[in-house]
Amino acid sequence: MIEGVLLKGYGGFYYVYAEDRVWECSLRGRFRVKVQDFLPGDRVRILPEEEDKATIEAVEPRRNALSRPTIANVDQALLVFALTSPKPDLNLLDRLLVQVTDAEIEPVLVFTKIDKLNKASLTKDSEQPYVPDVYRKIGYTVFEVSNETGQGIKEVGARLKEKISVLAGPSGAGKSSLFNALSPGKKLKTGKLSLKSKRGRHTTRHVELMVCAGGLVADTPGFSALFLPNLKRAELAECFPEFAQRRRQCRFNSCIHDKEPNCAIKEALESGEISPTRYEHYLIFLQEVIEAERRY
Ligand SMILES: Nc1nc2c(ncn2[C@@H]2O[C@H](COP(=O)(O)OP(=O)(O)OP(=O)(O)O)[C@@H](O)[C@H]2O)c(=O)[nH]1
Ligand SMILES: [Mg+2]
Ligand SMILES: [Zn+2]
């Protein structure tokens, strides 16, 4: 028997990646009853039969499972945002960071379209901090790439080896283009940006894992709005590393960094150590979390 990872189920078969190739698998008797129990990312043991055919004999317990997209055993999430056209929606980025962090999945930030960025105009407009640097300073892993010129692609590829990764981010950010740049030869459909709305056309629909740069990657359809997981108000700040790290210096142990006096987070905001947009989004999410708490 050999070990592998389920890539997708399709047409009654399961496609499993093992020993550097893809096997078309059917299910052994006892699994046939509970077909819905398999997700892309599940670690399975298969018994090769003929050529590329095999049967699934066993499945390992899951380490975690994402619900949107539905994938098991995710190691990291590549949060893909364009530096420009469309401008990065930082509310959505911070929301995804909360969601991923709460699911105990490591976030990796990938900013695309650096070829389109006019560096000259950026330095002049120094009131606006450079977005990748804001997140780098917090301690996140940040890449800036061009899917057109290939700049920075190799560095991202090195992060994928032997891991299960999901691509997430808004439509038109360049997720499918990034996948294509990472695995030349295999082409996913990408969208032409509609000039009018500057938004992508949701060219990606279904969920499957694909072999990419020595790892497994799932492309996902772009999302524009997400609900926060069922967090409690005290847990939200834990998903903001720069808050979590200062939380103990707040006067009140129960401080949620809103209206309380002697709050270390608000002091760091005032001295410019915490980004105003991050704090602003924290307050928005806090309201949502508090409202959700009331509904239970
Ligand atoms: N100049 C430039 N254009 C890019 C880059 N990455 C993507 N694009 C373009 O941006 C548009 C959207 O790219 P996609 O890869 O389809 O975006 P997506 O995130 O997969 O979008 P959905 O599948 O709708 O979620 C396409 O026209 C790409 O050619 C980049 O690094 N530089
Ligand atoms: Mg796509
Ligand atoms: Zn506080």
Image (spheres, helix red, strand yellow):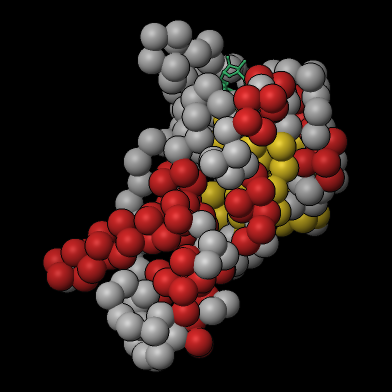
Q: Would residue 204 be found to the left or right of residue 50 on screen?
A: left
User: Which of the pair 4/33 is nearer the observer?
Assistant: 4
Q: Is residue 187 visible?
A: yes
User: Which of the pair 106/70 is nearer the observer?
Assistant: 106
Q: Would residue 5 be found to the left or right of residue 93 on screen?
A: right
> Which residue is outermost to the left?
295
Q: Is residue 12 visible?
A: no
Residue 258 found in image quarter: bottom left
**Which residue is found at the position 62% from the left and 61% from the top?**
138
Residue 102 lies, with reference to residue 74, above or below; the image says below
Image location (x, y in percent) of residue 196: 39, 9
Image location (x, y in percent) of residue 129: 58, 44
**Which residue is found at the position 41% from the left and 46% from the top?**
91
- Ligand 1 image-quadrant field: top right
Residue 243 lies, with reference to residue 106, above or below; the image says below
**Which residue is found at the position 67% from the left and 54% from the top?**
136
Image location (x, y in percent) of residue 227: 32, 51
Residue 31 lies, with reference to residue 221, above or below; the image says below
Q: Quadrant of the N terminus?
A: bottom right
Q: Quadrant of the C terminus?
A: bottom left
Image location (x, y in percent) of residue 247: 49, 81
Residue 115 lies, with reference to residue 102, above or below; the image says above
